[in-house]
Amino acid sequence: MSKIKDFTELKAWLGNRLPEKRYLHTLSVADVALSLAKRFSLDEKDTLRSALYHDAYRYIEHDKAIKELRAKGFFIYNEEEENDKLIHAPYAAMKMADDLEEAPSVCVTAVRFHTLGSILMGKIGAAVYIADYAEPRRKHLTDEDREKIFSLPTLEDMVKYIIEEQNAYFKEKGIENAEVTNELYSFLTRGGRFED
């Protein structure tokens, strides 16, 4: 397969490989991430590329993904190894340069950390993380919840608030948050800022 050259090709490729619900989620994430890019003066093409690609391998077979990631020496968090719904993030990050003609490192990093977050995710990664959580098709949030998130003044404040909401939900369900997410929360609580 030749590498995907532009956003029209990327959307068509995603439309052919993702179920309709996931594809519509992807387009919605891209819309929200792009609005955040405009608001915070991020590179719009890199943000759009990252947001569109973030779930490209959402349905990768778990054992296949683990095997390929290990073969390439790609670091995997324990939570990703144990959870079928998380392994697509490192796998997509690994595959991005194979699939796309342009795969800047900032995009690879954004895709890599869109599920668990990381202090390394950067501003574009933060925009994709926020958009993935808060896009309008997500049923776990009310319009008021979304308004609260988007009323916050910085990407850091939005990510911190989302982690707090997730932590409250996880506590209710008796689930431990990922260590990398806890590290990110501590970083933001101390006033840490995402790099470009």
Image (cartoon, rainbow, N blue to C red):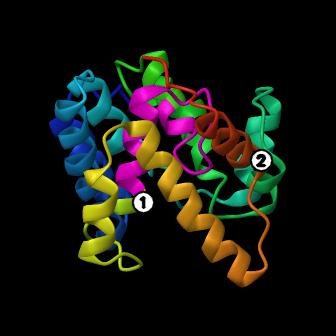
Tell me, for residue 6, which label it has, or none. Answer: none
Q: Earlier in the sequence, mark 1 or mark 2?
A: 2
Residue at coordinates 64% horizontally, 45% vertically from top-left?
A: 185
The spot of residue 61 in percent (x, y) is 66, 60
Q: Nearer the viewer, residue 1 or 74?
A: 74
Residue at coordinates 81% horizontally, 26% vertically from top-left?
A: 73
The spot of residue 166 in percent (x, y) is 58, 66
Distance in Å between CA atoms under marks 1 and 2: 25 Å
Residue at the disc numbered 2: 66
Say left or right for 87 vs 174. Answer: left
The spot of residue 161 in percent (x, y) is 49, 55
Q: Secondary structure at mark 2?
A: helix
Kindly give the residue lying farthest to the front in the view shown.
Answer: 190
- For the stretch drawn in magenta, the main secondary structure is helix
Give the answer, above or below, for where 80 lies relative to 168: above
Q: Quadrant of the C terminus?
A: top left
The magenta region covers 110-132
Give the answer, above or below, for where 152 lies relative to 113: below
Residue at coordinates 54% horizontally, 66% vertically from top-left?
A: 165
Residue at the disc numbered 1: 133
Question: Which quadrant of the structure image shows residue 107?
Answer: top left
